Image (cartoon, rainbow, N blue to C red):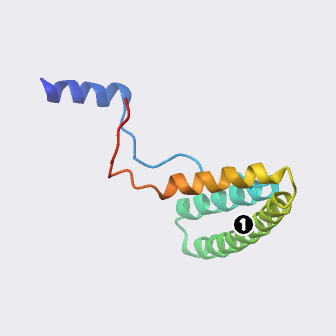
Amino acid sequence: MATTITQVAKENLGVTSGRSSGHKESWWWSDEVQTKIRDKQESFRDLLKCTDEEERLRLREGYKKAKREAKKAATEAKNTTYKRMYESLETKEGEHAMFKIAKARERRRYDLGIVKLIKG
């Protein structure tokens, strides 16, 4: 009975791949970076679909170029965003944000496998 229930659930609901959707650190992406990443993905899809060897070599070069441009645009956007963030942290209003960042880092540092105290 259990196997029948899981089989029906898989057919109706589907099975996840276990991967997270989207990019984890895409909050600093600008419109330019998003278009470059989209172009890189499209050129990679074209490369995978191609069967002709000469065409495949041309598409591979185009993919490599798109990959370099996307990486360069992402690095520039990330640098400018972090520079702006660090400049804002040095102000009086940025002090609150600094404490939020420190608190988030502290939470990430905790080991959830060991629970020493449970309240309530």
Is 2 positioned to the left or the right of 73 in the image? left
Q: Position of residue 95 (x, y in %)?
A: 78, 53
Instruction: Say which quadrant the C terminus sits in.
Output: top left
Going 60% across and 76% down the picture, which residue do you hit?
A: 57
101 relative to 7, above or below: below
Q: How many marks?
A: 1
Q: Position of residue 76 (x, y in %)?
A: 79, 69
- Of residue 50 and residue 40, the one placed in the foreground of this image is 40
Can residue 17 be seen by looking at this rendering? yes
The crowd level at tag 1 (other Cα within 10 Å; few <14, some 14-19, many 20+) is: many
Q: Quadrant of residue 106?
A: bottom right
Question: Label 1 sits on what residue type?
Answer: Ala
Q: Quadrant of residue 61?
A: bottom right
Going 74% across and 51% down the picture, which residue do you hit?
A: 97
Instruction: Say which quadrant the N terminus sits in.
Output: top left
Q: Quadrant of residue 38?
A: bottom right
Is 6 positioned to the left or the right of 96 in the image? left
Q: Position of residue 15 (x, y in %)?
A: 36, 37
63 relative to 38, above or below: below
- Of residue 21 and residue 53, the one placed in the foreground of this image is 21
Can residue 25 be seen by looking at this rendering? no
Is 47 positioned to the left or the right of 68 in the image? left
Helix, strand or loop under label 1: helix
Is 119 positioned to the left or the right of 105 in the image? left
Q: Position of residue 70 (x, y in %)?
A: 72, 66
Q: Which residue is mark 1?
A: 70
80 relative to 101, above or below: below
